[in-house]
Amino acid sequence: MQQLPYLERVKIQSEILLPLYKRLREELGNERAAALLRAAVKEYGTALGASVAQAVPAQGLDKVRALMPMFSAGNALDVEPLVDDAKEFSLNVRGCRYADYFRALGEPEFGAMITCEVDPPMMEAMSTDVRMERTQTIAGGASHCDFRWKATP
């Protein structure tokens, strides 16, 4: 799908998005700026999911498994596998260079919006036979991200 590790892609995206987001916060306030960014992230996530659906020939949980190298490339994630069978693919992310990067910039909320919030619309556009659950993220202040993907009947 792409040659550049996703973490590097996110860093490049943030070079223009972060200054724009800061200006939006100044002009429109935090709430409106965040709403606009979230709407754009949802559009991007949906487009990314549709692209993945076409580019990755696997189905169901195998499609999710096939995506992991894209998001973890370049040592971006420290993954703790939990369940990997025909009905469930679950893991915890114990270390996240995406969150580290945005925390170092002093913009963890922005980072969470442009990285973590891509996942739900991406999954929705990518697959109708897999449901993702995640109740917490490192970027949101938790000790780990709890990814649970389950095959739907």
Image (tube, grey):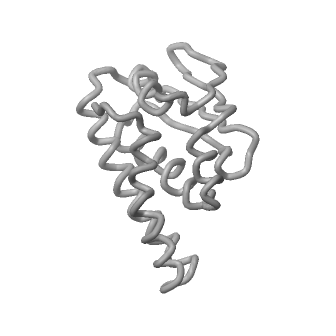
In the image, residue 18 sits, relative to residue 118, either above or below, namely: below
Quick check: can you spot residue 153? Answer: no
In the image, residue 37 sits, relative to residue 62, either above or below, namely: below
Q: Position of residue 47 (x, y in %)?
A: 30, 48
Residue drawn at point x = 48 percent, y = 86 percent? 27
In the image, residue 19 sits, relative to residue 79, either above or below, namely: below
Which residue is the extreme one toward the bottom? 27
Where does the N terminus fall, quadrant-wise? top left
Q: Position of residue 120 (x, y in %)?
A: 48, 46
Where does the C terminus fall, quadrant-wise? top left
In the image, residue 75 sits, relative to residue 107, either above or below, namely: above
Q: Is residue 16 left or right of residue 106?
A: left
Which residue is the extreme one toward the right? 143
Q: Position of residue 87 (x, y in %)?
A: 53, 19
23, 127: nearer the viewer: 23
Residue drawn at point x = 39 percent, y = 63 percent? 16
Q: Position of residue 37 (x, y in %)?
A: 45, 66
Q: Is residue 100 left or right of residue 6?
A: right
Residue drawn at point x = 53 percent, y = 57 percent? 113
